[in-house]
Amino acid sequence: MKTLVVGEGEHEQAALAVLVERISSRPLQCDFDFISSPHLHAHHGKGQGFVKRAVHWCLEAQKRGYEALVLLADHDGRDERIREMNIAQELDLGVSRRAMGIAIRTFDAWMLADERALSKVLGCSVSRQPDVETISDPKGRCAGFLESVGGQVSQRHFYAKLAHAMDLRVLEDRSSRGFAPFARRIREL
């Protein structure tokens, strides 16, 4: 299935594609774009910015000939994003196959959910992290782990390796407000 995967940052690009393919359990042809791509002007006027942005991405995916759209944004402490993304998921739009979600607090928090995968990828023992959806600076914590083992790989490569290694059931349990509903929507594609 030709799928447009839209996310926030460069460091999550490969990891998000890996997670989408692992969750869907079927081969996908994934192309990636950035949610705040400069060629897509979607946030005009007041209110429901993520609904507008999601609608524009649905139309863009359809225009580009994709069969499905996967769109993920960071929560960043803004609860309205969850509500807006849920509205956008349920709208009757041209792209019927879509999975939209909000990573609470950020995508980086998902990378902290499975201490076994962290230990394996880092090559050292990592203890279980606190509730990943409440960590105030998950990106900083991930960067700290990388730095503690010599920082020889990029954060992007680190995340991709974690996405391959982590137990998705653990991630769903540890990120019940963000990852779990997102994974359910991907399975429904």
Image (cartoon, helix red, strand yellow):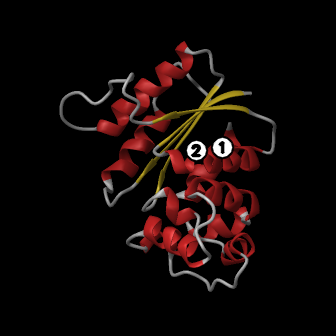
Task: Tell me the number on the disc at residue 13.
Answer: 2
Most distant residue in the right direction: 26
Please name which of the two marks, 1 or 2, marks the residue nearer to the observer.
2
Q: Identify the amino acid type marked 1.
A: Ala
Mark 1 Cα-neighbour bin, 10 Å: few <14, some 14–19, many ≥20? many
Q: Identify the amino acid type marked 2.
A: Gln
- For label 2, the SS is helix
Identified at 40% across, 51% down, the residue is 82
Q: Which image quadrant for residue 164?
A: bottom right
Mark 1 = which residue? 17
Give coordinates of residue 89: x percent, y percent.
49, 37
Q: CA distance from mark 1 to mark 2?
A: 6 Å
Which quarter of the figure is the C terminus placed in? top right
Task: Tell me the number on the disc at residue 82.
Answer: none
Identified at 68% across, 41% down, the residue is 188
Horizontal relation, residue 20 to residue 73: left or right: right
Most distant residue in the left direction: 46
Q: How many marks?
A: 2
Height in image: 50 above or below 82?
A: above
Identified at 63% across, 65% down, the residue is 152
Horizontal relation, residue 91 to residue 22: left or right: left
Mark 2 Cα-neighbour bin, 10 Å: few <14, some 14–19, many ≥20? many
Which quarter of the figure is the N terminus placed in? top right
Residues under numbered marks 1 and 2 in contact, where contact means CB atoms less than 8 Å apart = yes
Height in image: 91 above or below 166?
A: above
